[in-house]
Image: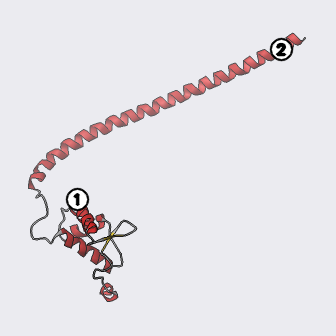
Amino acid sequence: MRLFMDAMARSIDIGLIQARRRKIAEALEQERVRHEKVVAGLQTELEELTIAERVFVKLSSEGNAASQQETPVGKPEGLPAVSEMIKEALSHHLKLGSPGLAPAGMLSYIRGKWWPEATSNDVGPVAWRMEQNGSLERLETGEYALPEKAERPTVTDRIS
């Protein structure tokens, strides 16, 4: 009787193991199919983006060839020094109640008032040098500000 029970327990255990193996194999196959679909979709998108990039580069290089020849390089003549533009931008924003500006804010002010073609490379490095030589301060926020000793607008300046 004991042999019969051992043989039956062994067949039940093997049956459970085989059933579990079949279930895992089916789940594995379903995941493999799902992943293949995802990979195929990503490959298609990658190919489309590669084509779009080539077209964009081709079209923009044709259009930019003429505009690059007409675009002057550097700051136009007759404008104040970039350092003066930066100081005015900071002074203006101080009057509005903002203690400082990031280089992007300075650039925006300079583009709006004097130099529409200015780039971040025209303004950011100048602001950094001004901070290094003490003409500007760097706030905890990372923004640049006029130094405390500089002439600050008064409350009446802010109102007007």
Q: Which is nearer the eye, 38 or 108?
A: 108
Q: Amino acid at mark 1?
A: Asn
Q: Are marks 1 and 2 in contact (CB under 8 Å)?
A: no
In this rendering, position of residue 16 left or right of residue 129 = right
From what the image shows, is residue 28 above or below residue 159?
Answer: above
Residue 62's quadrant in the figure?
Answer: top left
Secondary structure under tag 1 reads helix
Label 2: few (<14), some (14–19) or many (≥20) C-alpha neighbours in 10 Å: few
The residue wearing badge 2 is 6
The residue wearing badge 1 is 121
| Residue located farthest toward the bottom when viewing the structure as drawn | 156
The quarter of the image holding the N terminus is top right
Residue 81's quadrant in the figure?
Answer: bottom left
From what the image shows, is residue 44 above or below residue 106?
Answer: above
Residue 77's quadrant in the figure?
Answer: bottom left
Q: Amino acid at mark 2?
A: Asp
Q: Position of residue 131 (x, y in %)?
A: 28, 68
Chosen colour scheme: secondary structure
Q: Position of residue 125 (x, y in %)?
A: 24, 61
Question: If you read the primary sequence from the N terminus, does the residue marked by circle 1 or circle 2 appear first?
Answer: 2
**Distance from the alpha carbon under mark 1 to that under mark 2:** 83 Å
